[in-house]
Image: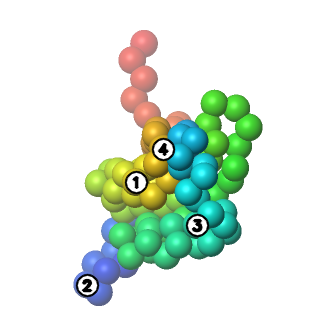
Amino acid sequence: MAWRSKKEVYPVSKYVTLVRLSAQGMASMGDPKKAYDEMVEASARMGINVIGGYATLGPYDLMVLYDAPNETAAAGMAMGLCARMNGQAETWTLIPPEDFGKLPVKK
C-alpha cells in the first residue's frame, strides 16, 4: 500500500496505538462516535489512513489500527490521541507475514 503526495508515492506502514484513558479522559470524551470521527478526520490531514478503532477489554481502553507514511506521523497520531483523550498511549509497528519472512535471522 502507498500514499500519494502531489508529486511522489510513498510506502506506508501499519501501526496500532493502544490507549489507556484517565478518569478525566473518560468523562470528557463525550460522544464516542463523534470523537472517533474527529480523530479520523484529523488523522487524514496528517496523511494517516485509519483502518479501524475499537474499544477493548483489558489493560487498554482503546485501540486504533492505521496506515501511516512514517514513524513521525505515527508518533503524531499517538500524541494527538493522548492530548484529545487525556490518556497514555503505546504504539506498535505491525509487520505483515510476507515481510516478516524476509527479516534477517542470525543462527
Residue 87: numbered disc: 4
Q: Nearer the viewer, residue 98 or 80?
A: 80
Q: Give neighbour class at mark 1: few <14, some 14-19, many 20+ (Cα, 10 Å).
A: few
Residue type of the residue flagged with mark 3: Ala
Closer to the observer: label 2 or label 1?
1
Element on which disc 3 rests: helix
First in sequence: mark 2 vs mark 1: 2
Residue type of the residue flagged with mark 1: Ala
x then y, percent, for residue 54? 68, 53
Identify the residue at image location x=42%, y=13%: 107
Residue type of the residue flagged with mark 4: Gly
Residue 35: numbered disc: 3
Identify the residue at image location x=60%, y=52%: 27
Mark 1 = which residue?
Answer: 83
Closer to the observer: label 2 or label 4?
4
Mark 2 = which residue?
Answer: 7
18 relative to 3, above or below: above
Q: Nearer the viewer, residue 12 or 97?
A: 12
- Label 2 – label 3 distance at C-alpha: 32 Å
The total number of labels drawn is 4
Identify the residue at image location x=60%, y=49%: 26
Regarding residue 17, the answer to whether it shows in the image is no
First in sequence: mark 2 vs mark 3: 2
For the residues bearing labels 1 and 3, Cβ distance under 8 angstroms: no
- Label 2 – label 1 distance at C-alpha: 32 Å
For the residues bearing labels 2 and 3, Cβ distance under 8 angstroms: no
- Label 4 – label 3 distance at C-alpha: 14 Å
Element on which disc 4 rests: strand
For the residues bearing labels 2 and 1, Cβ distance under 8 angstroms: no
- Label 1 – label 3 distance at C-alpha: 12 Å
First in sequence: mark 1 vs mark 3: 3
